[in-house]
């Protein structure tokens, strides 16, 4: 029977010969040499599958790139000198592009200082090293070795991590209406849908896990009004997509009986059930013991236990090659390090992984106290206390963990004697907003609800009121959002948000940073309406305005409509606005920074225009008052305009 664990530092005959015969490695002589060559990509892949550690590292450099049929591969070794240190790298070049490398692998003489040793205060401790060593070499994340490491992380966190345990103090009593009973491995108990109200009568509410994944384009099973009773009786395990099946297996491996999966626990054709459950979705994650996350699966059909992305190109999906992510020892006492290593920051080559491009996942990740990640690069852990991976199993604090930052800020902000630190919390919110708007939604109608639980958490913490995604207590500054590039306002089934809310617009949203400057507010909010019978809402401002016209059809300048030519810069919200010639434009002054740059004041405000009987926001303008002809005078008129924005 084939071993379920890979063997490290085992080289094929040709790799052993290449390392032994190298002219540059023994003495680190400066130069370049051909280290190894392959007649075709399949030769490299076959050697990797046969267990060559070095070939596995080389193959990992292809990632998702599809090699040309019959394309040969050349590996070059380059030794150079930089700042008194000798640097050695191996580089792969396909013959289809002989000077366009696939990437580099670093070569080191010693591993000393390259990997952190566990300390006495490490977040995770292990009774035996085999727990993480076997997981590091497991050929499948579905095997017992990976499950043992996952159980150890979860068990230790739920018993010893004070911050993670205290997170319960920030949650509400929200509980899902339904859960999935995962049954058992023997098939004696079926996988089925359960109503939690029925479970609670038998004792305390059961603990449960949650699933976080990309829906993708696959046709996934859903809970519908007409199949509720069928699913309460039995959910056919082998008819479920791979991610669901893998998640059920993981739930059993971790020793739990229940998991929440959105598409199977919310009635998908019931608007009332969707509204009820989606409004507490963030709290469902917050109250779960742990979230299982399919980190690199692009759809529910790819699963949690998949191999590397390049394996999908060749039909190999059940196994991964752990050697592609492990440092390899070669001759002369040198080590070759992987090009792709999943660190505790949970990104590869500074690129967000598939799951973290999904907008719903932003609040799922923030609010869940613990997340266990399964992906093509291995197993990873993230909790409030720390992050860990197979290669860094002892865990360490991650400076890039949104989860840790969120809880840390929430705790610190409430420890002051003067009440919550509003500046600290607001800065955190702006980071969340940027992360959220950078992600994608399958249904833009979900723009508000997909982040609503995070908004509610901040509202409970601060006492602030959120209106259409903007904080009422900071509403004038909140109005000054802008998009990186002109975007679109997607059509939605129902009214989503007014034009002055970033919620109405697709794309990455920013708020300018003013540092410690004290702004002078040049507008006053008179009223923010409640949604009317049509769902629409407005904000009424008392403010100074100036009529302007456009100088071009692109992002650029506006000029005053009357009098001396006064030019201001602006950023249109929508690409259609950037292309159209529009009339009846006005600049609405919102904020003035008296000493922005070199002592020069800066004016900022909204560009608005009339559509029928309504005035809508069209973009953001700004102008340095050091320019020859500022649009707005130093002394604003005592009587200002009354503008109603829809």
Image (cartoon, rainbow, N blue to C red):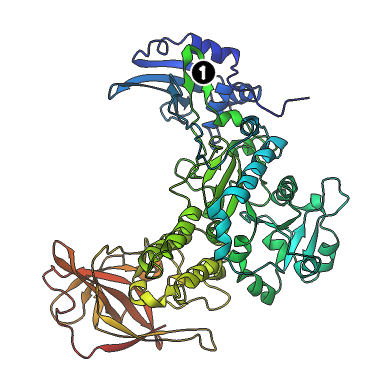
Q: How many marks?
A: 1
> Where is residue 176 drawn, in percent x and y?
69, 67
Q: Residues within 10 Å of mark 1 (few under 14, many from 20)?
A: some
Q: Position of residue 498 (x, y in %)?
A: 45, 78
| Relative vertical location of residue 259 with respect to residue 127 in this rendering, above or below | below
Which residue shows up at 79% across the image and 64% down it? 194
Closer-to-camera residue (22/638): 638
Q: Position of residue 573 (x, y in %)?
A: 38, 69
In the rendered image of this protein, does residue 107 appear above or below residue 231? above
Of the pair 472 and 523, the residue shown nearer to us? 472
> Which of the two residues, 50 or 395, is positioned nearer the viewer here?
395
Query: Which image quadrant is residue 84 in?
Result: top left
Taking the view exactly as shown, the residue that stands out farthest to the bottom is 639
Task: Pick the quarter of the image with the C terminus.
Answer: bottom left
In this view, the residue in front, 43 or 35, is: 35
Residue 25 percent across, percent down from the top left: 42, 13
Is 145 left, or right, of 29 in this rendering? right
Find residue 512 and report its image quarter.
Answer: bottom left
């Amino acid at each position: 029977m084939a071993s379920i664990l890979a063997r490290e530092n085992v080289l094929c005959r040709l790799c052993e010969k290449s390392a032994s015969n190298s002219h540059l490695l023994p003495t680190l002589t400066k130069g370049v040499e051909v280290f190894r060559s392959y007649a075709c990509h399949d030769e490299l892949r076959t050697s990797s599958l046969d267990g060559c550690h070095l070939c596995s590292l080389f193959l990992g450099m292809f990632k998702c790139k599809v090699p040309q049929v019959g394309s040969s591969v050349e590996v070059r070794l380059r030794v150079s000198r930089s700042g008194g240190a000798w640097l050695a790298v191996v580089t792969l070049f396909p013959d289809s592009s002989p000077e366009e490398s696939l990437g580099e692998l670093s070569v080191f003489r010693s591993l000393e200082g390259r990997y952190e040793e566990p300390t006495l205060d490490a977040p995770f401790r292990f009774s035996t090293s085999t727990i993480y060593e076997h997981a590091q070499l497991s050929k499948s994340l579905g095997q017992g070795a990976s499950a043992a490491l996952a159980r150890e992380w979860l068990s230790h966190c739920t018993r010893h991590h004070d911050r993670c345990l205290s997170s319960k103090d920030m949650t509400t009593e929200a509980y899902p209406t339904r859960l999935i009973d995962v049954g058992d491995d023997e098939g004696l108990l079926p996988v089925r849908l359960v109503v939690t109200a029925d479970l609670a009568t038998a004792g305390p509410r059961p603990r449960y896990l949650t699933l976080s994944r990309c829906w993708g384009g696959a046709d996934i099973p859903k809970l519908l009004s007409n199949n509720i009773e069928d699913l309460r009786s039995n959910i056919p395990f082998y008819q479920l997509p791979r991610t669901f099946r893998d998640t059920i297996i993981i739930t059993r491996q971790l020793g739990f009986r229940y998991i929440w999966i959105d598409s199977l626990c919310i009635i998908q054709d019931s608007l009332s059930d969707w509204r009820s459950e989606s409004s507490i979705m963030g709290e469902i994650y917050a109250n779960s013991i742990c979230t299982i996350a399919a980190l690199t699966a692009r759809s529910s059909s790819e699963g949690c236990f998949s191999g590397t992305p390049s394996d999908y190109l060749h039909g190999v999906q059940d196994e991964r090659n752990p050697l592609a992510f492990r440092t390899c020892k070669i001759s002369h006492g040198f080590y070759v390090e992987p090009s792709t290593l999943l660190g505790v920051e949970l990104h590869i080559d500074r690129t967000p992984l598939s799951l973290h491009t999904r907008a719903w996942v932003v609040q799922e990740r923030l609010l869940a106290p613990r997340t266990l990640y399964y992906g093509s690069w291995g197993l990873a852990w993230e909790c409030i206390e720390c992050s860990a991976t197979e290669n860094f199993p002892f865990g360490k604090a991650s400076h890039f963990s949104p989860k840790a930052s969120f809880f840390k800020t929430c705790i610190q902000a409430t420890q002051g004697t003067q009440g919550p630190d509003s500046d600290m919390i607001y800065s955190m919110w702006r980071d969340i907003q940027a992360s959220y708007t950078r992600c994608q939604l399958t249904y833009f109608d979900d723009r508000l609800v997909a982040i609503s639980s995070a908004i509610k958490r901040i509202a409970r913490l601060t006492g602030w009121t959120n209106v259409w995604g903007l904080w009422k207590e900071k509403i004038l500054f909140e109005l000054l959002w802008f998009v990186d590039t002109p975007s679109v306002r997607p059509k939605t089934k129902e009214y989503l948000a007014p034009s002055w809310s970033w919620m109405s617009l697709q794309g990455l949203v920013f708020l300018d940073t003013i540092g410690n400057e004290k702004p002078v507010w040049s507008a006053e909010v008179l009223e923010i309406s409640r949604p009317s019978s049509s769902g629409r809402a407005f904000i009424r401002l008392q403010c100074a305005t100036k009529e302007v016209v456009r100088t071009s059809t692109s992002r650029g300048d506006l000029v005053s409509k009357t009098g001396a030519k006064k030019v201001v810069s602006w950023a249109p919200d929508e690409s259609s606005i950037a292309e159209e010639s529009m009339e009846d434009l006005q600049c609405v002054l919102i904020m003035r920074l008296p000493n922005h740059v070199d002592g020069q004041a800066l004016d900022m405000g909204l560009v608005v225009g009339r559509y029928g009987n309504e005035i809508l926001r069209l973009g953001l303008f700004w102008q340095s008052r050091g320019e020859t002809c500022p649009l707005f005078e130093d002394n604003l008129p005592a009587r200002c305009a009354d503008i109603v924005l829809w």
